[in-house]
């Protein structure tokens, strides 16, 4: 396998520039922490602690001490957090004389937000070793980045802007940042970018069948109607749909961030971890889909009731298996991203952000039938993928 990470590690023009930016960020972060302290007169503990912890980022590449590897893992997350905290402080300190609330100000905020994590991703994350560690750190990356834009603009004048609030609440910009960081980090870990070419020996009739299945699920999930859950398999009602910018951006956020995490990062790394197993593609798809289902348990904290959340976990596992098998079979990462985004956009526009319907017996049985159907399709696709004898196009 080609060592693609050498683009950053060799002695070329990018290497010193990236290091310069990274160390400059650390210095700027420390200055902003102290500037915020002197203007707000808060406790002295915060700037001292942030200064010491930021200093750890400056020595992350010096493996002279036994604790250096621990520092690498800590700084991989801490520097990301330090960046968005410091950016928030900078806006607070300058909002009285800089036009942050204008179109240009919001645009600059978004651009800086998308770029400010990149030096940390290149300098620190490339030192993370061990596939299990990479798997865990990737999950920590997801939960660190996704809510960060909201924190950047919190309590600032930008938070009073309706457009900025919509972007913040949707998590769309966070998802873009996560996707960019995922590409950089996976590249430095010697993994290829997500698949964009259709896999060899992909059968056209299977592609057509998959398209029909995906369209049917999109309709049933968002527009299913009738007196009971089973009638939603064939009766659809489009009258209640209500598109908003927030719903569209939120759907795109889910499609980009969750597919990047579970169908690209997790699935790719799991295939390597389970490489010695004969049926690695089955196990990898099952594990990544199981984790995808479990993450939906967090909707309870958002106000969704437990019965609907458990149903959502089951449905997410089934659709996760379908998306994993589609990606593995077709080699097209864009397929699950588009389908996931459309499913959430239409679902949000028709039913709102949270599931609120009554969980009846026929609803549970119907959902189990759907999940079993998706598992059947998934195992067929995974078997077809397995029979192609090689998966080198995927990783």
Image: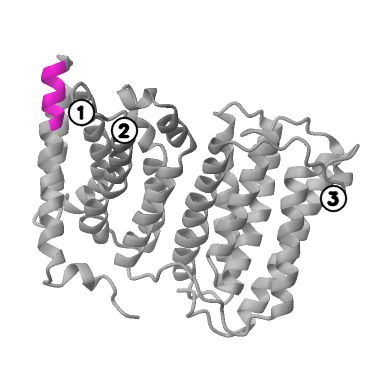
Q: Would you name the residue on which mark 1 appears?
A: 98
Q: Would you name the residue on which mark 3 appears?
A: 233
Nearer the observer, 297 or 242 = 242
Secondary element at tag 2: helix
Nearer the observer, 336 or 372 = 336
1 or 2: tag closer to the N-terminus: 1
Task: Give the number of the mark in front: 3 or 1.
Answer: 1
The structure residue drawn at horizontal position 75% and vertical position 64%, both measured from the top left corner, is 212
Residue 17: give its label: none
3 or 1: tag closer to the N-terminus: 1
Nearer the observer, 131 or 205 = 205
Q: Position of residue 272 (x, y in %)?
A: 44, 70
Between the C-alphas of marks 3 and 1, the distance is: 55 Å
Q: Quadrant of residue 247?
A: top right
3 or 2: tag closer to the N-terminus: 2
Q: Would you name the residue on which mark 2 appears?
A: 152
């Amino acid at each position: 396998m080609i060592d693609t990470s050498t683009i950053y590690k060799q002695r070329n023009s990018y290497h010193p520039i990236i290091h310069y930016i990274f160390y400059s960020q650390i210095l700027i972060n420390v200055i902003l922490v102290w500037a915020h302290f002197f203007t707000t007169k808060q406790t002295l503990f915060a700037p001292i602690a942030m200064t010491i912890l930021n200093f750890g980022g400056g020595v992350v590449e010096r493996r002279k001490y036994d604790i250096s590897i621990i520092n690498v893992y800590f700084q991989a997350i801490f520097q990301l957090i330090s960046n968005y905290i410091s950016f928030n402080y900078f806006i607070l300190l300058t909002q009285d004389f800089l036009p942050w609330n204008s179109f240009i100000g919001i645009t600059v905020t978004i651009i800086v937000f998308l770029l400010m994590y990149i030096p940390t991703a290149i300098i620190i994350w490339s030192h993370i070793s061990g596939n299990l560690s990479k798997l865990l750190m990737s999950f920590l990356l997801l939960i660190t980045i996704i809510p960060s834009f909201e924190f950047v603009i919190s309590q600032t004048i930008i938070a009073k802007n309706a457009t900025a609030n919509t972007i913040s609440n949707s998590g769309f910009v966070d998802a873009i940042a996560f996707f960019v960081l995922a590409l950089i980090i996976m590249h430095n870990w010697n993994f290829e970018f997500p698949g964009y070419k259709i896999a060899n020996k992909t059968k056209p009739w299977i592609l057509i069948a998959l398209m029909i299945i995906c369209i049917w699920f999109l309709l049933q999930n968002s527009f299913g109607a009738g007196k009971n859950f089973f009638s939603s398999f064939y009766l659809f009602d489009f009258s209640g749909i209500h598109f908003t910018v927030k719903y569209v951006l939120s759907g795109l956020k889910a499609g980009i961030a969750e597919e990047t995490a579970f169908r690209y990062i997790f699935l790719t790394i799991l295939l390597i971890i389970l490489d010695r197993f004969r049926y690695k593609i089955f196990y990898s798809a099952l594990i990544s889909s199981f984790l995808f289902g479990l993450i939906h348990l967090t909707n309870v904290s958002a106000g969704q009731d437990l019965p609907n959340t458990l149903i959502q976990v089951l449905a997410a596992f089934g659709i996760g298996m379908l998306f994993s098998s589609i990606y593995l079979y077709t080699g097209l990462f864009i397929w699950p991203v588009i389908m996931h985004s459309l499913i959430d956009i239409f679902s949000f526009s028709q039913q709102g952000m949270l599931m609120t319907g009554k969980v009846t017996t026929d609803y549970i049985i119907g959902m189990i039938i759907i999940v079993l159907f998706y598992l059947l399709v998934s195992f067929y696709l995974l078997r077809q993928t397995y029979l192609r004898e090689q998966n080198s196009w995927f990783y």
